[in-house]
Amino acid sequence: MTLVIISHTEHYKTDDGTLVGWGPTISEINHLVVHFDKIIHVAMLHDGKAPPSALPYTSERITFVSIPALGGRGIGSKLKSMVYAPKVIRSVAKVLREATVFQLRTPTGIGVYLIPYLTFFNKTKGWYKYAGNWNQTHPPLGYRLQRWMLKHQSRSVTINGRWEGQPKHCLTFENPCLTEAEVALGATYSTSREWPTVWNFCYVGRLESEKGVGRILEAFKALSVDEKAKIGTLHLVGDGPERSQFEAISKEVGVTVVFHGFLPRTEVFAIYKQCHGFIMPTTASEGFPKVIAEAMNFGCIPLVSNISAIGHYIHAKNGFLISPINTNTIVKTILALVEIDESEYDSLIKNSSSIVEMFTFEYYNKRILKVIKS
């Protein structure tokens, strides 16, 4: 059985010629390949240096087919995507001749024309994955159009969260990010955690305003001197064009802020182990960020926005929801965590385990194989 995956996943060539891609997607494919004779990944090859978080494929049964690196928010980028539409469609059509089943990962710029192509001009069995906020009130036009087309599909669509009026073919799915071995390791570590007297926090993701990095810095800056005394280090893992601005702001925050840049997976896990709170006051088009589950796996308590599907998994028994998303609320949420007692701390960590188990590759693979067979 051959699976064709079509996505906008960024790929790069390292100095020694090794092909690597965006870590979370590559990990998902590396764990899925055991159930297929072959996986062909049609995705984008970029110039430039690969980030440390990028990973190689681990099986010779995975083949990469490149399409032009497209996408972006500007008008020029969108026009370029449309100009290259015929080339992208030809590449996808050629690869689909080998497919038993396909997956198109959306929302993406190329999804605007690939969803109609696959819907009306290709009979291959397949499903769509919508990784954004399925219930977003005012999505960008391209996202809104793709979501409308997916709602009116005959093929299955996997989405984040459970929503009122959700079409039957739209299936609630968690995005996998952990192995069962990592969950077992996390459980062992979490049970050995001690109630802290000084609290370390972390954020993992793109360093940009939309994801809430500026709001994080402003919130810690707004703490009183006595409140800041309870804070150890704020770790920011990731990179982005606004990093230099955030680094300048961090000098006035009054707590220790460390910018790590992109890190390999094992080093990110080491950050989770050092920290007691994972903070992400995002307003971006999120589904359910995988990093929340990863942090929870190591006993790092989430302080996260109540948007999209996040509130379907995070609640008062296992974390803190930030709503509304502003500096004052973020400050109150930080203080709510650092002021809990030892019993409350242990309870929050213990109650994370049932959520974490839903984000394993093994759990995801069992469910997705049922979708393929149905």
Image (cartoon, rainbow, N blue to C red):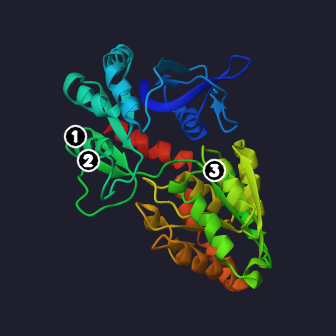
Q: Is residue 183 above or below residue 231?
A: above
Percent coordinates x, y for residue 108 in the rendering: 39, 37
Q: Which residue is mark 2?
A: 169
Give the Cα distance between marks 1 and 3. 33 Å
Type of the residue with mark 3: Glu
Is tag 2's residue or tag 3's residue first in the polypeptide sequence? 2
Taking the image as shown, residue 181 lies to the left or right of residue 43, namely right
Type of the residue with mark 1: Gln
Give the Cα distance between marks 2 and 3. 28 Å
- Report crowding for label 3: few under 14, some 14 to 19, many 20 or more residues within 10 A (C-alpha): some
Q: Is residue 270 above or below residue 58?
A: below
- In the image shown, does 333 or 80 lie closer to the viewer? 80
Taking the image as shown, residue 246 lies to the left or right of residue 368, namely right
**Circles 2 and 1: CB distance less than 8 Å?**
yes
Q: Which residue is mark 3?
A: 180
How many numbered marks are there? 3
Quadrant including the C terminus: top left
Type of the residue with mark 2: His
Taking the image as shown, residue 159 lies to the left or right of residue 36, namely left
Quadrant including the N terminus: top left
